[in-house]
Amino acid sequence: MHIETITPADSAWQGQALCAQTGADFFFPEPGSSVREAKRICALCEIRPACLDYALAHDERFGVWGGLSERERLALRRTAR
């Protein structure tokens, strides 16, 4: 995650997120790699809505955020317009 772009009020959810306990490798895989494990972890995380809101608000373009891949977030943005 890009800590330098998060304000203190925005980052309160991060300490409670399951991804903080597992490491970034699952959530930022090499191009073409599976995101299945990251999505499985996200599905169990109570903080998933805050994570997705953050990713959409800050136009995160890489990795799995809030249980959605880059492509899925892009599609969500397009349908929201």
Image: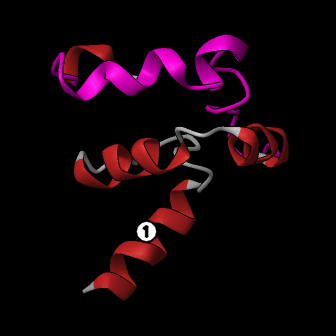
Place of residue 37 in the rendered image (x, y in percent of width and height, measured from the top left): 84, 39
- Position above or below: 10 against 31: above
Left or right: where 69 falls relative to 12: right
How many dots with numbers? 1
Residues 77 and 19: in front is: 19
Left or right: where 56 falls relative to 50: left
- Tell me the residue that label 1 is attached to: 74
Mark 1 is surrounded, within 10 Å at the Cα level, by few (under 14), some (14 to 19) or many (20 or more) other residues, namely some
- Position above or below: 81 against 6: below
Q: Is residue 60 visible?
A: no
| Badge 1 element | helix
Place of residue 58 in the rendered image (x, y in percent of width and height, measured from the top left): 24, 45
Considering the whole magenta stretch, tell me its main secondary structure: loop
Left or right: where 43 falls relative to 69: right
Please tell me in which quadrant of the rendered image residue 45 appears.
top right
Residue drawn at 40 percent across, 44 percent down: 50
Residue drawn at 82 percent across, 46 percent down: 34
Residue drawn at 23 percent across, 28 percent down: 10
Q: Amino acid at mark 1?
A: Leu
Place of residue 66 in the rendered image (x, y in percent of width and height, measured from the top left): 54, 48
Q: Which image quadrant: the N terminus? A: top left
Q: Which image quadrant: the C terminus? A: bottom left
Residue drawn at 18 percent across, 23 percent down: 9
Please tell me in which quadrant of the rendered image residue 41 appears.
top right
Q: Which residues are magenta?
A: 6-34
